[in-house]
Amino acid sequence: MNWLLAGAGALALLASSSAKAESADAEQMRAAMKAARWTGPMLASTAETLPKGHLYTEPYFFDVIVHGDHHPGSSGFYQYGLLDNLTVGFQPSFATATNGLDRGMTIGDFKLLSQLRLTHFTPDHQIPTIALVLNEVIPTGKDDRLDPTEEGHGSGAFATELGVNVQHWFLLKNDRLLRARANVLHRIYANSTVEGRSVYGTDATFRGHARPGARTTLIGAVEYSLTNEWVLAFDVEADFASRTRLSRREDGRPTTTSSPASWDIGFAPAVEYNWSPSAGALLGLWIIPKGHSTSASVTPAIAISKFW
C-alpha cells in the first residue's frame, strides 16, 4: 500500500510541476506577444480577424518593373470587424494608364473581402489560428477597347476566391518571436465579353468572349521580431494559372483559341518598423524570376498600416 501511495504522490508532483512549467511558458509567450509589434509581411495575409467594431487600413504603393518598363500603382486593404471572428472589407487597385507617369492614374479591378476565423492562437492554447476566406473580384478595371498606346488594368470578368489562411507563433530561446503564415487561395473566373484590342492580346477586329484560367496561389511567410519595433520578414509565393480561352465567330462558325498554362515562383524580403502598437510601415522587394509563360519582374513596395 505504501508504494501505491508513494507512486500516486510522485504522479501528483509531476503533474503539478508540468502545470507550473506550462503556466510559466504561457506567461513568457504572453509577455513576448504583448511587447512585439507587427505590420505583416509583404504578401501573406493574416488568419486573425479584427475585434468587433474596429477598423484596419493598409494602403501600399508599388512599381512593377518588367523588361525595364515601370508600372507604378497602388492598392491596399480596408477592413472592418463585423464580429469578433468575422472581418469584411475591400481592396481597391490603381495603376498608371500607360508606362508614362504623366498620363495619370486609372482604376483596376476591385475586390470585396471576407474572412471567418475558426480557431484562435492564445498563449494558453497554442494552436494555429485558422480562417476561411471568401472574396469576390469586381471587374472595374478597363480590359478591352484599348487604344494602341493604352494598357489594360483589369480582367473584365467577375471572379470568386476561396481560401484558407493559417498563422502560428513560436517563442525562440532568446525570448524573441517568430511568426509564421500560410495562405492557400483559389480563384475561379466567369466569362467576359471582349471587343477590340484587350489585355488578352486580341486585335482591333476581335469580337467575342474570354474565360480566364483558374488561378491557385500558395504563400508561406515568416517574420522575426528583431526588437519590439523592428521586424524582418520573408515571403515565398507560387502562382499557377490554367489556360485562358478566347472564343469568337469567324465566317459564321465558332472558333476557340487558348493561351498556355503558366506558373511562377517569387520571394519577397521586407523590413517592418512599427512606431506604436497600432501603426507601422513596411518596405519590401518582390522578386519573380522568369517562370513558365511568365516574365521576370521586380516590384519595390511600401505599405503603411493603421489599426483604429
Image (cartoon, rainbow, N blue to C red):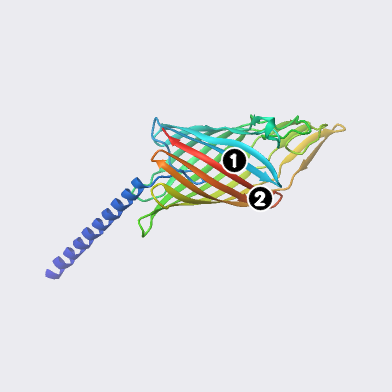
Position of 75 compared to 86: left or right? Answer: right
- Give the secondary structure at mark 2: strand
Which residue is rendered at x = 50% and y = 44% of the image? 282
Q: Taking 198 as reference, is 121 above or below it? A: below
Residue type, label 1? Phe
Q: Nearer the viewer, residue 241 or 292?
A: 292
- Crowding around mark 2 (Cα neighbors within 10 Å: few <14, some 14 to 19, many 20+) is some
Answer above or below: position of 272 versus 90: below
The label shown at residue 232 is: none
Q: Nearer the viewer, residue 252 or 45?
A: 45
- Across and down, in percent, residue 264 comes to 64, 51
Inter-mark Cα distance, 1 to 2: 22 Å
**Image quarter of the N terminus:** bottom left
Crowding at mark 1 (Cα within 10 Å: few <14, some 14-19, many 20+)? many
Front residue (pair 106, 54): 106
Query: Residue sitting at 49 percent across and 38 percent down?
Result: 304
Task: Name the outermost residue toward the left.
Answer: 2
Image location (x, y in percent) of residue 52: 39, 32
Upstream in sequence: badge 1 or badge 2: 1
Question: Closer to us: mark 1 or mark 2?
Answer: 1
Look at the picture and state if 279 lies above or below 24: above
Q: On the rendered structure, is 285 left or right of 24?
A: right
Query: Can you identify the residue that label 1 sits on?
Result: 62
SS at mark 1 in the image? strand
List the residue tagged with mark 2: 263
Decide: is 114 above or below 35: above
